Image (cartoon, grey):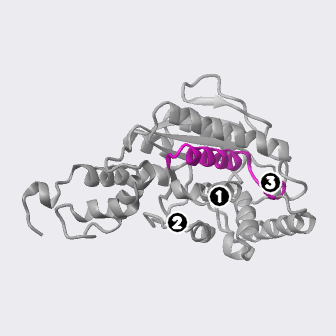
Amino acid sequence: MNISIILDHLNGLTKPPGSLGRLEELAAKLCLCQKTLKPQTKPRHIIIFAADHGVTKEGISAWPAEVTELMIKNIVSGGAASSVLANTTNTALDVVDVGSFGQPIDKGNNYKNARIANGTANLAKEPAMTRKQFEQVLQIGSEEAECAINNGAQVVAAGEMGIGNTTASSCLSTLLCDVPVESITGPGAGADDRIISRKIQIVSDAVEKVRSQSVGDNIEDIASVCGFEIAAMAGFYMTAAKLKTIMVIDGFISTAAALIAEVLSNGTRNYMIASHCSAEPGHKILLEKLQLQPLLDWSMRLGEGTGALLVMPLLDAAADIVSKMATFESAGIKQ
């Protein structure tokens, strides 16, 4: 099914052509990805990948690293914003710990301990992870996408939890977009001016080190400033695209992972829907690099996949419009 068939159908519905604006654009994207005029947006599944970052030792976050462990428990128990929004939008949610510092949770049907290490190395001092670790966690994300889709998910999303991950994402964004560090680096989870200044210096130094030592290996360069949860999301996106499944992208960190996925597997972006543009300054730059137009701009910066979850009802609306509205012909209306 090509786009002209989809647009002809949308223009034949009982409304002035294009009068539903971006809802029609969203409907067309769903139809194009699923190759049908009756797209499905349920069931759906979001995986929250969690990990810690050694760079938190450099004072780049307003929150201590211990919060990652506490938030994993909060998400699993249903008290986090992502948990609430997943329930509200009828989206299955699982948490996969790929490398946090804390103790694994003893129980929880929606929790998996898949750690490859207790946090990344300090990217300010050494490569955050080895190539082997990067490929290992990429595979974990891939397997989670395959599992969700094989279990019937028509739409998938990935979120993250990890104190310090905006610093890793700023490094990745600066490296992959080739833009000034200052235009990318923001407050993350509420950093003040002093912390932001420190963060900019750490990011600048880390990226410069990668560039000066690079031998032209994308994976090696990315791994040196990446986070385990970010790499897992990249693997998740790459496999979802290979399985021709729609994925909803969340905020700054998720979009950094989305860019990694596109760099490593060209065309992955074709199955992406950008949920929102966050308050993090680098997010807009990443979205432009991926040529994705966000559905919302609500100054969100929480992460956890909350932006992706928030727009799930918009996908439902778009799917229903294209599949349930009458056509002029079926309604007996002459155009």
At 20% from the left edge and 60% from the top edge, which residue is drawn? 13
Label 3 with label 1: CB-CB less than 8 Å:
no
Q: Is mark 3 on a helix, strand or loop?
A: helix
> Which is more foreground, mark 3 or mark 1?
1
- Disc 1 or 2, which lies upstream in sequence? 1
Indicate the quadrant where residue 154 lies. top left
Residue position for label 2: 292
Task: Give, as a single range, the part of the protein colored magenta.
Answer: 218-246
At 22% from the left edge and 49% from the top edge, which residue is drawn? 324
Q: Can residue 189 be seen in this view?
A: no
Residue 244 within the magenta-colored segment of the rendering: yes
Q: Is residue 81 visible?
A: yes
In the rendered structure, find residue 22 and report the number of the disc placed on it: none
- Disc 2 or 3, which lies upstream in sequence? 3
- Give, as a three-letter code, the residue at label 1: Asn
Q: Classify 10 Å Cα crowding around label 1: few (below 14), some (14-19), many (20 and above).
A: few
Residue position for label 3: 219
**Quarter that holds the C terminus:** bottom left
Q: Position of residue 209 (x, y in %)?
A: 89, 66
Out of 165 and 271, give the one closest to the viewer.
271
Q: Position of residue 184 (x, y in %)?
A: 67, 71
Q: Is residue 287 above or below residue 65?
A: below
Label 1 with label 2: CB-CB less than 8 Å:
no
Q: Classify 10 Å Cα crowding around label 2: few (below 14), some (14-19), many (20 and above).
A: some
